[in-house]
Image: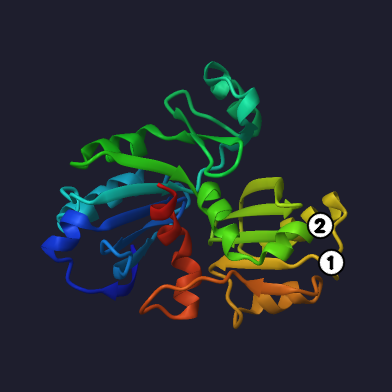
Amino acid sequence: MQVHSIISNTITEEVRQKGHQSIRIAPDGFSVFISNASYRPVFLSHYGYTEPDLSGVIPRECERILNEMELVTFEGETIFILDSAAVTMVPEKFFEENRAGELLRHAGEVADTDQVRNRVLKDRPLVLVYAVSQEVASLAGLLRKEVKILHTLECLISLSDQVRASDHQRGVVLVEIQPRTMDILVIMGDGIRLSNHYTLKDPADFIYHTLNTFRQLELDREMVPVYLSGIIHREHELFGLLGKYVRNVNTTPYFLEELSREDTLRAMILSEGSKCA
């Protein structure tokens, strides 16, 4: 296990009672982000693993860390954010809960033991449907307070509000990249035109998927901007590489106190999750 500790302030009793705890679970590890009642960051660490198949390992490792830090008994708000491949959106007026599993299986692989969850998106007439593994659901059940389980895509849609309204109208592409996953969101005329979740063999693969999205939707690479979040920052070599093909490449605007711009990009999904919940 590799631990990347960004903020390690003391988690006071007041934070434990009134704060916000966000845990993001990805194919290669998990992250724990804790903020106080005013959403000021208090603790942030990433826990990464290099083994090829970690589907059942990561929830157990997350449980171990939460127990060591006495965060299982966290009394404030706790949310889980999943980077799962099985996710889809359905217009609210056409959504039928008894068909959610069927719809989801068209979008990605769903195990027999997975739970099918759904959430109505804030300020949008859409329902997000996604799979929650048995291991993650069991981990959530161990915590003292009820845990809300979200998908990364919901947080990315919420983050899109950070982008200028004019970009929402003419068209904008938001991409969130992690070492093994990416989520891409296209907004035009203030409506969601496309959303996709991909599993990556290498972070560089995000460039192919981004350019393929431009091609499929016939987007103008000279006019439509791309906003990046996650592990790709302005000094990253892949940022410059994408800039050779798309004229306007930016990082998603966001502010987190005490964090550098690079760390903010990686943690903004964790922070935004608390506001989505």
Q: Is residue 235 visible?
A: yes
In this orientation, which residue lies closer to the viewer: 70 or 225?
Answer: 225
Amino acid on which disc 2 is placed: Phe
**Above or below, comparing residue 209 to residue 166 in the picture:** above
Picture quadrant of residue 239: bottom right
Q: Is residue 247 above or below residue 109?
A: below
Q: Secondary structure at mark 1?
A: loop
- Residue 64 lies left or right of residue 129; in this view the side is left
| Quadrant including the N terminus | bottom left
The x, y position of residue 261, in whole percent, is 49, 79
Residue 265 sits above or below residue 123 on the image: below
* Residue at image mark 1: 221
Please tell me which residue lies in front, 76 or 264.
76
Amino acid type for the residue under numbered disc 1: Arg
- Please name whichever residue, 277 or 195, is drawn nearer the observer in this view of the structure: 277
Q: Residue furthest top?
A: 98
The percent position of residue 89, horizontal first and vertical second, equals 62, 36
Q: Please state the horizontal and vertical placement of residue 37, each as a whole percent of the image.
A: 26, 61
Q: Residues within 10 Å of mark 1 (few under 14, many from 20)?
A: some
Judge from the rendering whether residue 74 lies leftward or rightward of residue 155; answer left or right.
Answer: left
Q: Earlier in the sequence, mark 2 or mark 1?
A: 2
- The residues bearing labels 2 and 1 have C-alpha atoms spaced at a distance of 7 Å
Q: Residue furthest left?
A: 13
- In the rendered structure, find residue 10 and report the number of the disc placed on it: none
The answer to whether mark 2 and mark 1 are in CB contact below 8 A is: yes
Instruction: Identify the residue shown where x is 60% and y is 30%.
Output: 92
> What residue is shown with label 2?
214
- Asked if residue 135 lies left or right of residue 198, the reply is left
The quadrant holding residue 129 is top right
Per the image, label 2 sits on a secondary structure element best described as helix
